[in-house]
Image: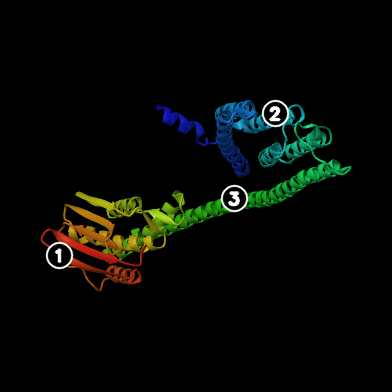
């Protein structure tokens, strides 16, 4: 890593591991303020050595402290408050030393540095430490103005009696006004944060209640789907028992078609019961299961295969019933009329460029008779296509029969 990259990383703001936005803001403020102090004190240190200023070594000490605190804070960001407090205290000691011990020069600029320390501690460390530095500064400057101010070398001034005492009181009042302002800022800030915190936990509690209610409702809905599926299966079983007593083949075939239609609807409730989503059904799984059960119901003889491919993963639970009934009629007709011994059924569903759903169905069988457009199954298809705002066409070719459906009101 180059020297430039090391310097950039040294001054880049590190990430602090906390969920408290106020704590994060304080850390960033302290970090940026430290950079500003380093830049400012570096310039003052450089100028003080150039012009041989009497406080040059003090500036150098402060600059060293700031640089050390910068490195330590980067390594131990959780202890940044301790570092700010330590740096503030050391700088305050240096300032108080120059005011009380080394009082050959007038000490006015130090007042502004102490105000900076007071504001910094208020923002970063809180009200208690801010008050501490206000009180400490007030005591030091009370002593300075009343016992050391007039002893400054080369300084002569004529003052009225008690003038310095009055100035001292005004200065202390000013410091405490700063503290009062910062106190009100912190108090209002804490009240706002407290309200936001209360609102957050209230919403969190409500969220837990809503999630629990939703979970209970989901379980209840799953149980309803399970019971509906069971009821459908009971109806299917009854119809099958009834069909076994029917000798007329055409009537028995009608019963079988009714059974398949009911089983098609029952399968939707079964998939909803098994699914984590109560609004959508996995289309590939549903169609695979549907076609498999239809073929079993017709006791297919010979090698008849099928393939189902859907580019649409999930389907609305209401619309999938109509789609399933359409495919039920198509597969049933193919099994009854198209195949003698072997064959293949192909189902492909995808979304077209215009946004509608395209359903392509085909079989490669040779139909023993043409589909009757007046048959009940074909009429059902026409009804469902109308409800789904769709159109379809049937094409009979040498290699089989093909259906092309375009459904607009389905997703």
274 or 55, nearer to the observer: 55
Q: Quadrant of the C terminus?
A: bottom left
Instruction: Determine whether 102 is above or below 231 in the image.
Output: above
Looking at the rendered image, the disc whose residue lies closer to the viewer, 2 or 1, is 2
Q: Name the residue carrying label 2.
A: 94
Q: Quadrant of residue 407?
A: bottom left
Q: Name the residue carrying label 3.
A: 212
Instruction: Determine whether 246 is above or below 184 in the image.
Output: below
Q: Mark 3 packing: few (<14 Cα in 10 Å), some, or many (20+)?
A: few
Alpha-carbon span between mark 1 and mark 3: 55 Å
At horizontal 35% and vertical 62% (from top left) the residue drawn is 261
Disc 1 vs disc 3: Cβ atoms closer than 8 Å?
A: no
Q: Quadrant of the N terminus?
A: top left
The numbered mark at residue 331 is none
Report the number of numbered marks.
3
- Identify the residue at the far left of this view: 398
Disc 2 vs disc 1: Cβ atoms closer than 8 Å?
A: no
Q: Name the residue carrying label 1.
A: 396
Q: Secondary structure at mark 3?
A: helix
Residue 265 image offset from top left, x and y in percent? 39, 60
Residue 410 image offset from top left, x and y in percent? 36, 64
Looking at the rendered image, the disc whose residue lies closer to the viewer, 2 or 3, is 2
Looking at the rendered image, the disc whose residue lies closer to the viewer, 1 or 3, is 3
Q: Secondary structure at mark 1?
A: strand
Alpha-carbon span between mark 2 and mark 3: 61 Å
């Amino acid at each position: 890593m180059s020297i430039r990259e090391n310097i950039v990383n040294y001054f880049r703001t590190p990430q602090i591991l906390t969920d408290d936005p106020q704590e994060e803001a304080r850390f960033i403020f302290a970090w940026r303020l430290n950079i500003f102090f380093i830049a400012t004190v570096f310039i003052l240190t450089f100028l003080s050595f150039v012009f041989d200023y009497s406080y040059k070594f003090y500036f150098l000490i402060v600059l060293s402290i700031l640089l050390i605190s910068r490195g330590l804070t980067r390594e131990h960001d959780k202890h940044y408050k301790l570092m700010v407090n330590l740096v503030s205290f050391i700088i305050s000691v240096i300032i108080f030393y120059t005011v009380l011990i080394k009082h050959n020069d007038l000490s006015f600029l130090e007042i502004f540095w102490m105000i900076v320390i007071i504001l910094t501690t208020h923002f970063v460390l809180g009200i208690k430490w801010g008050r501490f530095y206000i009180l400490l500064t007030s005591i030091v400057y009370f002593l300075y103005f009343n016992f050391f101010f007039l002893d400054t070398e080369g300084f002569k001034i004529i003052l009225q009696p008690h003038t310095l005492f009055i100035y001292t009181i005004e200065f202390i009042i000013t410091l405490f006004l700063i503290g009062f302002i910062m106190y009100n800022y912190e108090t209002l800030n804490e009240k706002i944060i407290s309200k936001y915190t209360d609102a957050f936990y209230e919403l969190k509690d409500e969220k837990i209640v809503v999630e629990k209610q939703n979970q209970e409702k989901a379980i209840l809905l799953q149980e309803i789907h399970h019971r509906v599926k069971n009821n459908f299966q009971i109806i299917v079983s009854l119809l099958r028992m009834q069909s076994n007593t029917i000798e007329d083949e055409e009537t028995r075939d009608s019963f079988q078609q009714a059974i398949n239609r009911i089983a098609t609807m029952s399968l939707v409730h079964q998939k909803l019961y098994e699914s984590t989503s109560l609004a959508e059904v996995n289309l590939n799984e549903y169609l695979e299961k549907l076609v498999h059960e239809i073929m079993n119901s017709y006791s297919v003889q010979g090698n008849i295969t099928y393939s189902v491919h859907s580019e649409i993963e999930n389907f609305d639970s209401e619309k999938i019933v109509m789609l399933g009934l359409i495919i039920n009629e198509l597969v049933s007709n193919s099994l009854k009329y198209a195949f003698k011994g072997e064959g293949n059924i192909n189902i492909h569903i995808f979304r077209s460029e215009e946004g509608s759903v395209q359903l392509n169905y085909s079989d490669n069988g040779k139909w023993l008779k043409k589909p009757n457009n007046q048959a009940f199954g074909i009429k059902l298809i026409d009804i469902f296509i109308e409800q789904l705002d769709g159109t379809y066409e049937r094409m009979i070719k040498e290699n089989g029969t093909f259906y092309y459906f375009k459904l607009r009101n389905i997703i």
